[in-house]
Image: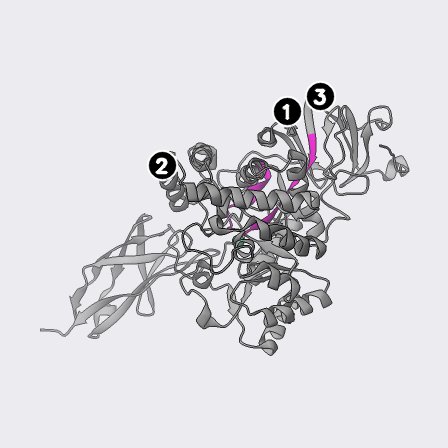
Amino acid sequence: MLLVLAFAPLKLRAQTLVIDGATLIDGTGRPPVPDSVVVVEGSRVVAAGPRGQVAIPPNAQVIRAEGRALLPGLIDAHIHFLDFMPQMFLRFGVTSVFDTANPTEWILATRDALNSGRIKGPRMFATGWVIDGPLATSNLNHATEIGGYKTHVENAAEARAEARRLIALGVNALKVHEGLPTELLAVVTGEAQKAGLQVVGHAEDARESVLEGGMRFLEHHRAVTHSTVRGEPARNVPEADMDPALFDPLIQILVSNNVYYNPTVSRSILHLLSKEREWSELGLQYLEDPAFRFIPEPRRQYWVRAARNLPPASVRSEREAVGRRNVEEFIRRFVNAGGKVLTGPDVAGTSGPSNLPGLAMHIEMEALVDAGLTPMQVIQASTQWSAEFLGQDRDLGTVEPGKLADLLLIEGDPLADIRNTRNIRTVILDGKIVDTTLDPNFRSPLPRPVTGGNPLEYMGPAVSRISPVIARQGDSAVTLEITGEKFTPRSMVRFDTAEVSTRFVSPTRLNATISADLLRNAGTFAVTVITPGSGGGTSNVIYFVVNFRD
Ligand SMILES: [Zn+2]
């Protein structure tokens, strides 16, 4: 292990940072280096190796790290970003994230704001919205349909146009869903390849999506299950019907085609695992910590309720136990055959309390060790292999000279117990020590545009009731009491097209005065609430009747 790059003349040198004395686990899978010295200049690692082989430059800022382990910053290879999340990733040592489905223009603007430091958070890579097959074959209740970030293509021309449109907008990869027929998937992967990008997503059948569709990143376990069950998979625990005799032929196809596999164990088969309750309780500890109150209250409450309402740890049925063993056996054989698993627990608006941003990475890492991977393999799956898939391995994923200095310093030995990755002492992003203290007032300057559907996510005001609901032509002023949600001191009431005098009482109550001149004409008039500014909106309409004069 070596080596020191030539030092630039002193006056040109950027700030030098040294991590001194840690056990270096560099993400490459090589044996750990005890008592290491890692030198960072500006944003890059310039030297890394055992003490004695790496010189400590004078005037460097030195972090003493005896008894600690130094890893590459974690890369979460599968998230669906919501705007309150960025500081949570850094808090848990996740320095890069890959978003695989969100409104395209918004997620790319957010990505650029994160990557330029305008929003504090991890580096981001993103696919924009999902390309799926013809509308009739997909489930309209799916969250991505409601959020409006999925497109349906009917034929090759549409698939090509959509892929090109997303590539022109600047996505880092293309995302597909399983409703996309294989021949259209092949069109999408062909366009991606021309642009030097990959296709990631859901698949119906792993073998066909890889061999005929050209996919190189399978999200979730479902496609593998489908390809290793003889006949139709059962609805109830289909994993129990996986035939281990079919594993190796499929693994051979996946490995020889360099397919990255993201099983989302702690999400997709959480119900088969014995630690569901333990992990939910871990999530609950954070949700109840006042430092986490920046999470929008309806969502925080939703997660708290979900964690509290989980039934007591139940014994898994024999069928569930078999299903779990099959999934874990497949993962083990896949990695031992040279396959690359990616850690990415699918943090999303639909997540449960054990799937909190950042924390979920550590839970998924534990789940992969429980499945039988070594801690070293799991660390690679969480760093080097994800960087490789993203085409970022020149800059990210390992601690080596020339790489960007995204680093994680933890207490204890993660190779002895992978849960030690949670004992985070220092997070370094782009060569700078990150203050991981959570900002209780954090609000994204780019709130996520959500157009209704999910009550946990919509931003704008909503009106449920007004009182009174009627007046008479020629009446003098009427005071309206308006009941609803998400009112702010800046909210204004509009009567027909006129803004009326509004008084903020509480987030669920406004008072408004309808003046006499608005009551001159009989009719049924729209009352709405408008909250101006970034993240604001216009409420639903509720009607007020002006009756004819006596
Ligand atoms: Zn997902």
Any magenta on residue 79? Answer: yes
Q: CA distance from mark 2 to mark 3?
A: 39 Å
Q: Position of residue 164 (x, y in %)?
A: 65, 71
Q: Locate the C terminus and report the quarter of the image it occupies.
A: bottom left
Q: CA distance from mark 2 to mark 1?
A: 31 Å
Residue count near mark 2 (Cα–Cα under 10 Å), binned few <14, some 14–19, many ≥20: some
Q: Secondary structure at mark 2?
A: helix
Residue count near mark 1 (Cα–Cα under 10 Å), binned few <14, some 14–19, many ≥20: many
Name the kind of residue labelled 3 in the image: Glu
Up-down relation of residue 98 to residue 318 (above or below): below
Q: Is mark 1 within 8 Å of ligand 1?
A: no
User: Circle 3 is placed at which residue position?
Assistant: 66
Residue 526 is left or right of residue 355, and the answer is: left
Name the kind of residue labelled 2 in the image: Arg
Q: Secondary structure at mark 1?
A: loop
Front residue of this view, candidates 288 and 379: 379
Up-down relation of residue 110 to residue 318 (above or below): below
User: Circle 2 is placed at which residue position?
Assistant: 308
Task: Please name which of the two marks, 3 or 1, marks the residue nearer to the observer.
Answer: 1
Q: CA distance from mark 3 to mark 1?
A: 10 Å
Front residue of this view, candidates 461 and 283: 283
Q: Position of residue 514 (x, y in %)?
A: 25, 63
Q: Mark 1 or mark 3, which is nearer the start of the sequence?
A: 3
Name the mark on residue 412.
1
Name the kind of residue labelled 1 in the image: Gly
Whether residue 404 is visible, yes or no, is: yes
Q: How many marks?
A: 3
Task: Please give the name of the residue rendered at 60% of the width and 58% of the height, measured from the top-left corner.
Answer: 109
Report the residue that reaches farthest toward the left.
550
Highlighted magenta segment, given as a residue range: 70-92
